[in-house]
Amino acid sequence: MAAQDLHRLQPAPAHAPAPTGPLAGAAGKATAALDRVLPRPAEADAGDPRQWRSEQETVAGWIDRLRGTRIGAEINRQAIKWCAAFLDEGQAAVAMPGRDAGLFAAWRRLAAYDGSVAGLGETVAALPASADACIVLILDGLGIVEADTEGYLRLHLAALPGWAGFIKWRSDNPGYDWQQRHPADLVDYLAIRLCLERALVADFAGGTLGCKPTLTAIGAKLAAGPAVAKPLSPPVAPAAARLHRLALHLRLAPATLAQATPDEVAALLALIDAWPEESHAPVWLEAAEESYRHDLAAALAPAAMKIARTTADEPKAAAQLVFCIDVRSEPFRRALESVGPYETYGFAGFFGIPIRFVPFAGEAAADLCPVLLQPRHDLTETPEPAALACARRHLAGVAAERSYKSLIASLKGNIAAPFAFVESVGALSGVAFAGRTVAPLGYGRSVAAFKERLQPKVPLSPILDLTPKQVPCGEDHGHDHDHDHDHGHEAEDLWGLTIAEQAFYAAAGAKIMGLSAPFAEFIVLCAHGSTSTNNPYAAALDCGACGGNHGGPNARVMAAIFNRPEVRALLAEQGVDIPASTLFLAAEHNTTTDEVTIFNVDRVPESHRPGLARLQRDLLDARRINAANRRKRLPEAGKAGGSDLHVAERSLDWAQVRPEWGLARNAAFVVGPRALTAQTDLEGRCFLHSYDWRMDEDAKSLEIILTAPMVVAQWINCQYYFSTVDNEHYGSGNKTTLNVTGKIGVMQGNASDLMAGLPWQSVMAAEDEPYHEPLRLMTVVMAPVARLATLIARNSILQRLFDNEWVALLVIDPETGRFLRYRRGRTWSDVTAGDGRQEDDALVPGVHSGSTVVQPTPTIPA
Amino acid sequence: MQQATQTLELHPMKKIEIIVKGDQAQFVRDLMERTGISGYTMIRDVAGMGHHGFHEGRLLFNDTSSLVVYVAVAPEDTIGRILKGLRPMFEKHPGVMFVSDVAVSRLEYFQPVTA
């Protein structure tokens, strides 16, 4: 049952229409009898509702509940205001002063001047200067006992999870530039909130209630106040009406039910009550998930049988390409394989090398690795020796662009200048505005061409061997030296890695992927990234394995490492014999436009030029095929122009809220050889990681795959899941009302919590129609099941994911040919198709279906 | 021939060793820095067995899932503050800590630093 249909089911109305006819009479008799027998609905929990509920509300919340005030909302509003001001990273025209002293100290200084909260100045002046002491004093003053303290502080933290989460991230990353200069932590944040609460509560207590701001005093006043009406229990449909609806569903004639005895009627009603409305949702979810998983297993079965039975070597490929495991790679890989003899692999998009990368002529370093890792090496690129003049022009162009941008920013931000600025250059902006809106493709291309003339492309190569960090080509790099050093306590003053480390990453990559002879003429390491305009969510479309960045640098670094003769010699010692004729190339797949750019093509030797030309032609063909397929799923399909123009335009259109669908509809993570999935159209819903169980006796590679790339895939799956099912709370709401705040995140409107999930447009196709199907991830592994059992037993992260059913696990055992599903409690159930066992009622909770007789289908229905 | 031996000047200190899961490593580090400790050593990718079963060591692409050992030396009162801060954490999360007596020769090197 498709998930789209689930939301269309209407909940049962509380009042069903009264039955008429013979049923009414019979039901009337039954009702009278039943009313004596059936249990009453549970009373709302006893206890005086005017009491403070210590685990569920703060003092402000308590007052709000009983008196209808909005103190809690006011505390939030003030906290948002101050956090946005303090944590700003350059967006504000006038920056908050005094931030060097830390969040609480800076706030304390300025709070005295804030007139929007009555009495705040006096409150703050009377409190100590240290945040810790402040918290203790305020909690004591309110009368909160130590046992309740933790719960109380937790409530305050949970009030604005986005802002609190960001502050926690800042305090967990002391090496982060802005955190070094303007330190913030959660203790400061809590102190601010408690001060605000104290001031507001004192104002209310003193003013309206006329008492001191302590728990006991406020409690006495509230208890003496008007009684709070008990919440009404929902009206219970009379038994007769429920029976009537049951009869309709079961397509029983009312007469049949009218002849039932009171005992039978009671049994029917008890059956309905045994499975209340709240229990339905998990079963519907499981049904939706199992229908997809069932079809996936069926689609993979024929390929699995073939692999298990044959060990034939594949014919030699023209090139082997390694793509990221991202779900968007799968359709492109299929398209490429259809146009030529190409072997494709899946590997984590950072290619196994966790680096902190500073681009040439760039300012800031980026951590190009999954957030599970700390980057271990600092790397950058330098110009080829022959291209120094070009490099100088490029740097000059970059410097010119920077000064132009800062000039514009200061003119805009200046108090007096904007009017004169608009008067004089407004017309030019108008041209840009018109260009971007009316002809985004043409405008974007002309800007790119102009930029290329200003900043000519420089042939670069990564610094691989250990080199001291100094300005390599003797020129000013334009580096802002405050920024690019001293990140974290691992700051080294060297670029690069040792030869042994280079060989280590190369060997690890080759082994985990199962890259082995015969090696093709080209091995392309293809990273990915996306391009969009005016999109605060750009990082959500980039490579997750690279921490939300483009993976190009990692690809270039690893390709350069693999091409080194010294590294190949070390690899040969470990049994990975790459012939001298094999050339590694680095490339980047633009997932918005489907363009694959191969880097440094001018450095490819003559001998390989024909092969390269063919590869580039085939990549272009694959691009057309894939763009055409993707266009069918994008709204506004059918625009004029060829399909690859349309997707290119989406990347340059500043009004486009949905440049591409990203990882929407992700559903499974497949670990195994490409032969397992090559014949199936997975519709871009699966993460594919290459793995050859025959090359991994000790299960080390499998362990690495399941404890890192699979974990990242589960995060992505959960993010899409929760953003779809409750976009308001777990997602970010509608993109059109979002505002970027402080260059750190987005808020809805002008003051809300920092929104952490995906926006509505990224997961929904239309009002009430989700595009992403919210299913939990299923991992499919082709390996002997004993290996999985061992890995789960010794990795608590796998226990947490599989035993708690965040991720389902299907193992295709190549030695026995069985399909096995992991069940809670470290057991396995055999779900191999074609066994002849009956299909159980898989929808009954707690009963898992056995195998079914199924016709393998080549595609999976949407 | 008698060799002039210099007597070793050793000062007693306390050493604390804390073994926690990767998820709690940041908390322990934060706590120690707040108590003003002069320094600590961190040993990563540790494997071990405890009440919650065996725990694997180094995972190639995942820094957060293995065990971490912190070793620090400080005067007794600083160690006492650390212990107080750790106790609520150990009520909820797996891990162990040990305190032992050690001696150091450079007393001033291990004095607590004011935040």
Image: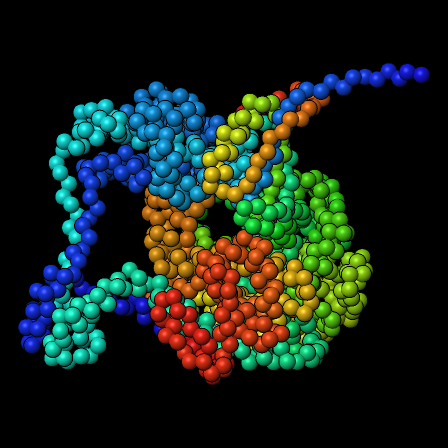
- Judged left or right of residue A212, residue A853 is right
- On the question of residue A433 being in view, the answer is no
Write down the quadrant of residue A597 in the picture.
bottom right
- In which image quadrant can residue A196 be found? top left
Nearer to me, A248 or A315: A248
Whether A60 is drawn above or below A662: the answer is above
The residue lying toward the viewer, choosing from A640 and A208, is: A208
Q: Position of residue A343 (x, y in %)?
A: 65, 73
- Left of A838 or right of it: where is A452? right
> Within the image, what quadrant is residue A52 found in?
top left
Instruction: State whether residue A768 is above or below residue A297.
Output: above
When the figure is inspected, residue B35 is found, relative to residue A744, above or below; the finding is above
* Residue nearer the viewer, A170 or A439: A170
Left/right of residue A587 with respect to residue A561 in the rendered view: left
Residue at x 69% of width, y 76% of height: A317
Query: Height in image: A405 above or below A734?
Result: above
The C terminus of chain A sits in image quarter: bottom left
A668 horizontally vs A276: left or right: right
Q: Residue at x 17, y 53 (%)?
A: A233
User: Which quarter of the rendering shows the N terminus of chain A?
Assistant: bottom left
Residue A157 locus on image (x, y percent):
38, 39
Residue A720 in sight from this viewpoint = yes
Q: Position of residue A518 (x, y in %)?
A: 74, 73
The structure residue drawn at horizontal position 39% and vertical position 69%, both measured from the top left corner, is A847
Instruction: Identify the residue shown where x is 57% and y is 57%.
Output: A793
Q: Position of residue B19 (x, y in %)?
A: 59, 40
